[in-house]
Amino acid sequence: MASTSDAKAQSSAAAAKAKAKPKAFSIEGLFITKNAYKQISDEFHPFHRHDVNAFLHFWTTGLGVWGAINIMLALNYDLIAIVYGYAAIIFLTTPFTTGLLHTVMIAAMTFLPQLSVNAVPLPQINNLYIALIALVAGYALQDVAHYICMEKTYMGSYIGSNPAKLLVHSLFLLPLVIDSVTMRYCFLPWFVTRNRNIFVPVASKSSIDFLRKWIHENIPETKTTTHIWPHKQDATTGPVQALEDDAAIYADFRKVFSAKHFDIRPIQGMNEIYITAVGAKKEINSDAVFYTPHVDGPYWWTPFGSCYRLLVGVTPNKMVRTKFNLQHDSMDRTLNMYDCLGFDYNRELHWIDHAPGVTNDERRSVIKLHYVVYPKGWHRYGAFVANCNQTYNTWARGNFLRTLKPAGVYEFVLAWWIWVTTWTNAFCVEYVGWDNVVYIGISYAMGPLPFLLLTSFRHYMVYMTTFAFRDKPVAFGYLMRDAKLYKTIALYHLGRRLLPLIALPRDLVGVTMAVAGFSITMLATAQLGFVRTYFGSELGFVKPKWIEGFPYNTIPHPMIVGQLIAYSSILWWFRESMTLETTALIGAHMSFYTIHMVQEMLTSSY
């Protein structure tokens, strides 16, 4: 009886609470509690979980709204009052930050075409047909974005049962996509290069035990490496397939490639069992490639698609280490029995060496598994990436086996060709990066001003985004490579503008002051070392260390302050001879350094 009374009391309380709670689309729900926007927001975002979908929606929605605004301006400029009213309603019914960003965007869409750049007026975009095309394209491309990212549309969830909600959805659409962008930190984490390698013990240990025994009983010892194609051997097909489907491997994959963004499938045609040679390694054959920094495949240019090579240890190993040139030394791995080490077949620079004073009691054997990773639902594209890599791997494997025992001039030349091309590609990857080659090339092709802007400040984005989003493993070598590369290009841009202005001995004082500032930065770098200079302590690669030597015992934040001193000296001394562009360029560098210094002061780990 008591339980029945309790239930009635709870029911009454719930009813009273529901009655007291304002309706979402009441005046209070719209403007005071803003529950109306919150309700639509809670319904909207589950249909836009994919980062690329959110990114595309920002641009397609902006295009559509821009078109709608310019339709009104083309029909009658007095209709701008409607634009003002729309902006005011959104500001009053959405969270403050969302409303403020929305107001800025609407103001830019409305008034920016009326501004002028370098005294050259921009045309007033009030052509009705262009605006109509923009509106229709913005709407249609949103469906395309959903199709590309394999996500259902929010409108599809309600249009059959509650078509009137389309009006509210349309009203709040731009602030909703603004929220999608801000909740992803404006996509700034995309600038951070993550460590995408995987390392995990496999769950299918019985398969490893079987393969180890099979190799011992069936594969004789040789002076060159042995390569077995497991799916062409009846005895090995089952155990290798069990490893391909290993739960631990897939779980570690998903730490790097989320299930909402990527599909992962095995590439069985590339898999092999690798058994090391007996005796000293020879230098003039293709086996030497393993001991040379190399990238396995050439398809670095397949966007959003990756081929992964996973090495699974079949035998105990303490001697052979796998090293990664563009990761921190702590990321080097010794692949022991039951361990699985995975890396991008086309992008990760790696090689092997021997731990000093350590030997193995058994021939080192590994299973090479391969997987294609591609955007979720893009199965044809995934098949294309897999086919490209498998075809190349088959061709390269044939050349590799042909040069294991070079019998003539052709085989020796082929072996050297493999080594030379491997070394050349590795050099480019380690010090420049093919993706950076493409970025710099496109920037250059766009013209002098885009090239200047797109390559002068990229290293600041690398610094600041890495420092801000350092919670996940960072690919430390990539960070150092890209920061150094774009810093060098930035200095090139400054040098070609400043060096012609210098005339000695007239400018000796100004040059001395600038050199003094840069020297403070270099001394600070020497005190820290390169690893700590590039946030090695903050990223967890080295232990924090208190630096007591000059300039740290005298000047706060000497690495950045030194740069500010140098650039201030240049601005002051050459103020009469510098162009406005050069002055603005130096001012921008100083601004970025100041912002980063404040960032370090406010968000440092120590």
Image (cartoon, rainbow, N blue to C red):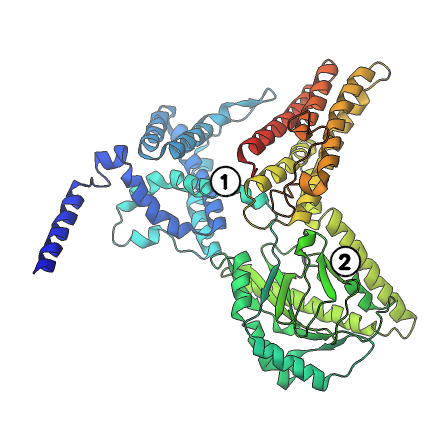
- Amino acid under disc 2: Pro
Callout 2 secondary element:
loop
x, y (%) of residue 148?
49, 55
Q: Please give left or right for residue 109 compared with residue 29 in the image.
A: right
The residue depicted at 68 percent of the width and 69 percent of the height is 391
Q: Please give left or right for residue 417 compared with residue 21 in the image.
A: right
* Numbered circle sitting on residue 186: 1
Q: Is residue 596 above or below residue 59?
A: above
Residue 483 vs residue 557, the one in the foreground:
557
* Numbered circle sitting on residue 293: 2
Q: Which residue sits furthest right?
A: 409
- Amino acid under disc 1: Cys
The residue depicted at 16 percent of the width and 49 percent of the height is 14
Q: Which residue sits furthest left?
A: 1
How far apart in space, not on screen, are marks 1 and 2 (Cα)?
Answer: 36 Å
x, y (%) of residue 37?
31, 40
x, y (%) of residue 586?
68, 24
User: How dense is the environment of label 2, judged by Cα within 10 Å: few (below 14), some, or many (20 and up)?
Assistant: many
Q: Is residue 407 above or below residue 415?
A: below
- Let me know if residue 267 appears in the view: yes
The residue depicted at 86 percent of the width and 17 percent of the height is 504
Task: Give the mark nearer the N terminus: 1 vs 2.
Answer: 1
Disc 1, disc 2: CB below 8 Å?
A: no
Task: Name the quarter where the C terminus is drawn.
Answer: top right
